[in-house]
Image (tube, grey):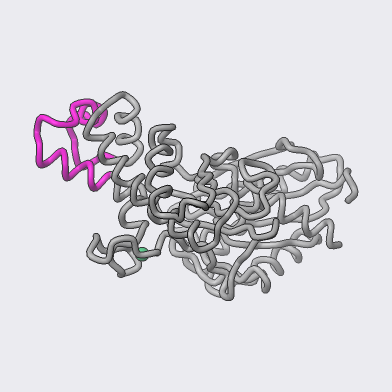
Amino acid sequence: MKRDWLLLALDFGGTKLTAGLAASGERRWRAHQRVPSPPGSNAQSDLEIMMGLARDMLAPAKAPLGAVGASFGGPVDAAQGLVLLSHHVPGWEKMPLRESLEERLGVPAAVDNDANVAALGEHRFGAGQGCDSLLYVTVSTGIGGGWIVHGRPYCGADGMAGEIGHMVIDPIGPVCTCGQRGCLEALAAGPAIARHAQQRLAEDPQAGQALRALVGGEVQVVTARHVSQAAKAGDELSRQALDQAARALGRGIGSAISLMNPQRVVVGGGVAKSGPRYFEAVRAAARVTVPPEMTVDIVPAALGDDAPLWGAIALAENCLRAS
Ligand SMILES: [Zn+2]
């Protein structure tokens, strides 16, 4: 691979748009910009904003652009380069994003959904380097996942492999956004943690003083981030709410491990910033659900919020290698 090409990474998130520019072979950003997706935006307006970011970054660049990789927060047919839809922004239905990027930028492009792309990012540049098989799980407002098998992304028949968030953990559990009961997402994602803590605060007016203090007594505004913060400060109610979510996540990851026996599981997303105690609870729950001979290696993501963006750089690198 030529070393003097630039690679452009684009991350179309549900609420924000991020672009990064790196040189092939380099592991630092030459340029990096993140903007909120404005209220009332649609596919075309988001694409125009992204192209504006790309132009700003490329104008002062000395080397030529070699390829572009894009991460999309929604289902994607990666083989066709087609976005299937967005759950947040209208107008993305059956949008040929790869073709559109190739036309606009004049270089090869590749597109995939954010969980698959983040898995690729952690595998090539982060906590999964050197692993032959890897499950990446992101835990934030929702729960998603992506697989690396034999060093390559495994997307499944519909590009949907790794949808661990909608594995049923408790058939009589709370209703999920997808309509099923007791999905992992309904038990362990950020909103589930916040809801559980809010219920406990309402039930026991004396409990969770540190958590109450964080929100000025306004129980209804408690988020998973508050719970995580209070748990780190030793708040017992917050620790229990987080532990319960961690145990559900551990059971879900344990089932995935039993099925596929991956070398490592990397957990990213906002909730994964909850610290070592959270990870211990996840590992302990996973350990008891898998056969004793199986590896249970569950680690925090290394690339943080930039995992999809570095994964998009990996996609662009692949394009450059193939061209
Ligand atoms: Zn679900």
238 or 191, nearer to the observer = 238
How far across and how far down the image is residue 136, in percent?
55, 52
- Please say whether residue 196 is one of the residues in the magenta stretch: yes
Q: Residue at x 24, y 31 (%)?
A: 215
Quarter of the rendered image showing ligand 1: bottom left
Q: Which residues are magenta?
A: 194-222
In which image quadrant can residue 241 be found?
A: top left
> Eyeballing the image, is 12 above or below 299?
below
In which image quadrant can residue 99 be found?
A: bottom right
Q: Residue at x 48, y 45 (%)?
A: 269
Q: Residue at x 70, y 38 (%)?
A: 31
How far across and how far down the image is residue 296, in percent?
51, 47
How far across and how far down the image is residue 306, in percent?
59, 42
How far across and how far down the image is residue 281, in percent?
37, 40
Res. 247 visible in picture: yes
Tally of marks:
0
> Eyeballing the image, is 75 above or below 205?
below
